[in-house]
Image: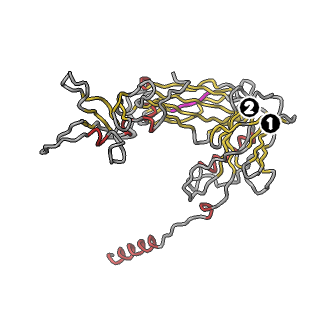
């Protein structure tokens, strides 16, 4: 019996030792396909397209924007509307389109390749009836409701942008200019309150084609965990809704299957993704994307911490503590004091790689001497919220 057990162990060890890492050729593929993201907006808001190229799965790059391209929208009667590059790989334009015409996107990349999308009809989205949320034991589910009384939409896509208020662990009333600690201008340089933003990264589509009425009820948008810092102070989400043609819907469904549902043997098998963008200068140049046209329905909601259960968020930087730093610090068992402010805060004078940020002054018991004894301070992660967001209040915030 014991001999059989030994043989079993030896067999398992042999099997494990024979394993080799398999790297399929696609991981190191040098193909770089053009990725086109955006919708021709027929409404009053701007139309924005993002251009990028695919990267190797085995590489270190996670983003590869295409800059210096020329984009225009053309209608089926010969008119064209140019775009302006606003940021790396992001192109925007504002125009009011005629819903009776068809439109397409023309792209000329810096390597002189040209791409053209198929002409598409304008398909406007019905309004969002509501965006709301439900509380459960471990977070909130945000959902959207909509309907088309004319039963003409049938195919939908949603995405979103989240924004939330964050607070650092300490409110800093002072800052260093490198040589001296000065009072902080809290009106223009507050680093206690910031706003962080996140955009949706998953594909959310829905269809009412098999229903009698064109009604979407409580379509899930996103789940926010109860431990997320997003819910710690105040949270806002802007949900955008797009009306799709059946071809556009099938493209997004296929893309979702290929990018989000390939985790097990029961998921869909990879398949060719066919969009409506084609190269007119190089038939072998592949573009990934589907250009649609129509207005975009949107709705924003706000959720405050007071509206939710008494949840506790997991801090991004746990274990934050404030240090006491003095201008004249006398170490134990020493007769010589030294300046801890220059040692840890005034970064022109210190040799440590990351200075601390002063929080508040330690008052001098000698009221005739206005200079404080020193300052409380902590690491930048614990004091400076701009590491996670911006201290410029968004225009829409309320």
Q: Which quarter of the rendering shows the N terminus?
A: bottom left
Rendered residue at 38%/35% (across/down) = 177
Query: Which residue is under mark 1?
Result: 103
Foreground of the two, 317 or 70: 70
Rendered residue at 50%/29% (across/down) = 392
Query: Which residue is under mark 2?
Result: 294
What separation in Å lies between label 1 and label 2 (alpha carbons)? 10 Å
Asked if residue 210 can be seen in this view, the reply is no
Rendered location of residue 200, percent (x, y): 57, 38
Rendered location of residue 236, percent (x, y): 52, 28
Rendered location of residue 337, percent (x, y): 18, 41
Q: Which secondary structure class fits the magenta region best?
A: strand
Say left or right for 279 vs 128. right
Please report whichever mark, 1 or 2, sits nearer to the chain's N-terminal start.
1
Foreground of the two, 364 or 203: 364
Asked if residue 198 can be seen in this view, the reply is yes
Residue span colored magenta: 141-145
Q: Residue furthest bottom?
A: 3
């Amino acid at each position: 019996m014991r001999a059989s057990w030994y043989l079993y162990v030896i067999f398992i060890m042999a099997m494990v030792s024979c394993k080799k890492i398999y790297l399929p050729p696609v991981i190191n593929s040098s193909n770089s396909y053009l990725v086109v993201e955006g919708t021709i907006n027929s409404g009053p808001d701007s139309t924005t397209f993002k251009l990028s190229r695919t990267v190797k799965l085995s590489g270190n790059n996670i983003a590869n924007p295409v800059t210096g391209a020329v984009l225009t929208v053309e209608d089926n009667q010969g008119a064209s509307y140019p775009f302006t590059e606003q940021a790396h790989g992001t192109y925007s334009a504002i125009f009011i389109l005629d819903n009776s015409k068809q439109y397409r996107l023309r792209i000329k990349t810096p390597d002189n390749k040209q791409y053209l999308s198929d002409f598409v009809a304008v398909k406007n989205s019905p309004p969002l009836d509501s965006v709301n949320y439900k509380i459960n034991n471990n977070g909130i589910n945000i959902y959207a409701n909509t309907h088309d009384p004319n039963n003409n939409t049938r195919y939908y896509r949603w995405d979103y942008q989240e924004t939330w208020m964050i607070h650092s662990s300490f409110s800093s009333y002072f800052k260093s200019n490198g040589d001296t600690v000065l009072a902080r201008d809290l009106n223009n340089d507050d680093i206690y309150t910031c706003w962080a933003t996140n955009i949706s990264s998953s594909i959310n589509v829905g269809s009412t084609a098999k229903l009698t009425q064109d009604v979407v009820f409580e379509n899930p948008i996103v789940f926010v965990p109860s431990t997320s810092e997003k819910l710690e102070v105040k949270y806002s989400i802007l949900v955008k809704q797009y009306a799709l043609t059946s071809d556009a819907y099938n493209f997004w469904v296929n893309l979702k299957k290929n990018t989000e549902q390939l985790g097990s043997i029961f998921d869909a098998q990879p398949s060719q993704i066919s969009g409506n963008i084609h190269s007119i200068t190089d038939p072998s140049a592949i573009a990934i994307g589907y250009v649609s046209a129509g207005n975009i329905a949107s709705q924003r909601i706000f959720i405050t911490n007071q509206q939710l259960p008494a949840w506790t968020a997991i801090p991004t930087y746990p274990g934050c503590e404030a240090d006491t730093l003095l201008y004249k610090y006398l170490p134990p068992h020493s007769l010589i004091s030294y300046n801890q402010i220059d040692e840890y805060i005034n970064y022109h004078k210190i040799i440590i790689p990351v200075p601390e940020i002063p929080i508040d002054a330690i008052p001098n018991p000698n009221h005739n001497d206005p200079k404080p004894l020193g300052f409380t301070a902590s690491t930048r992660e614990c004091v400076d919220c701009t590491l996670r967001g911006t201290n410029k209040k968004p225009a829409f915030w309320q």
